[in-house]
Structures are given as C-alpha cells and as structure tokens.
C-alpha cells in the first residue's frame, strides 16, 4: 500500500504564497499519477492539479498561472506551490496518489486566506 501525509498549510493574507508538501511512503513503486484536490466548506471536493509519472501536468482552469505542482524523481514527495493566494482559495487541501491497488488519500492540510 501507499500512504500519503500532507503538510504546509496555514493562515496567510491575500497575495501571499504557500507551498504544500505531500510525503509518500510504502510501496513507492506503485505510485502513479499524483494530484492535489481541495474542498471548501459547503462545497464539493475539486481538482487543483495532477502530475503523471512522465511529468505531464493538468490544472484547474481557474488556477493556471498561480499554482504549480511538482514531484521529486523518487516520487516520495509531491508539492503544490501556491502564489497570489486569494480568499477563495481557502479550503482543505488533499494529496492523492493513484496506485494499482487503489487511490491513496491523505488527511488534508488546511489553507486559510484571510486579511
């Protein structure tokens, strides 16, 4: 199995930046496409960004240019760089790793953007 743990969330002001981290452990060889999702209060979980094992990326249209997903070569870490944060970015951010045995989700890390 694969286990994921997110970190790096916090309280920031509008316009500031944060970098989220996702630590991946377990059967790393089975870690395939990785992604970040978020869920704001009262809303459904939504895609933020994904990255395949070949490095191809996909972003939510409204986040392109502000958010950047990255991953280290051993696939033990995945990151989400978030710039120019807005109040609307406030949410619980989740890391997802797809594996042959199913999707591995973390518990989430809270990002709050407020003045």
Image (tube, rainbow, N blue to C red):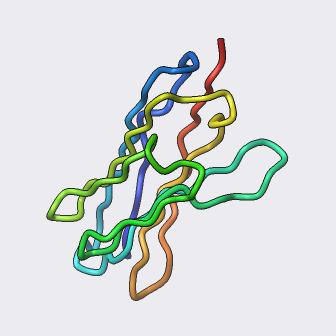
Q: Quadrant of the C terminus?
A: top right
Q: Please report the residue visible at 54 percent of the width from the left and 55 percent of the height from the top.
A: 48
Hey, which residue is sitting farthest top in the picture? 115
Q: Give the left or right position of residue 12, taking residue 101 as reference.
A: right
Q: Quadrant of residue 73?
A: bottom left
Hey, which residue is sitting farthest bottom in the picture? 100
| Image: 106 above or below 7 | below
Q: Please report the residue visible at 42 percent of the width from the left and 51 percent of the height from the top.
A: 5
Q: Please report the residue visible at 29 percent of the width from the left and 62 percent of the height from the top.
A: 25
Q: In which quarter of the image is residue 20?
A: top left
The number of discs equals 0
Q: Quadrant of the N terminus?
A: bottom left
User: Residue 88 at what x, y percent from top left?
Assistant: 69, 35
| Image: 83 above or below 15 | below
| Image: 68 above or below 106 | above
In the image, 54 versus 79, the foreground residue is 54
In the image, 47 versus 103, the foreground residue is 47
| Image: 12 above or below 110 | above
User: Residue 16 at what x, y percent from top left?
Assistant: 47, 21
In the image, 50 versus 98, the foreground residue is 50
Q: In which quarter of the image is residue 92?
A: top right
Hey, which residue is sitting farthest right in the picture? 42
């Amino acid at each position: 199995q694969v286990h994921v743990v997110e970190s790096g969330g916090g309280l920031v002001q509008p316009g500031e930046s944060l970098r989220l981290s996702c630590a991946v452990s377990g059967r790393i060889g089975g870690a395939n496409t990785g992604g970040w999702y978020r869920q704001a209060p009262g809303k459904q979980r939504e895609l933020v960004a994904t990255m395949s094992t070949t490095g191809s990326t996909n972003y939510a249209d409204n986040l392109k240019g502000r958010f950047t997903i990255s991953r280290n070569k051993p696939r033990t870490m995945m990151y989400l760089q978030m710039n120019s944060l807005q109040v609307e970015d406030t949410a619980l951010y989740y890391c997802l790793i797809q594996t042959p045995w199913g999707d591995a989700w973390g518990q989430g890390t809270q990002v709050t953007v407020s003045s």
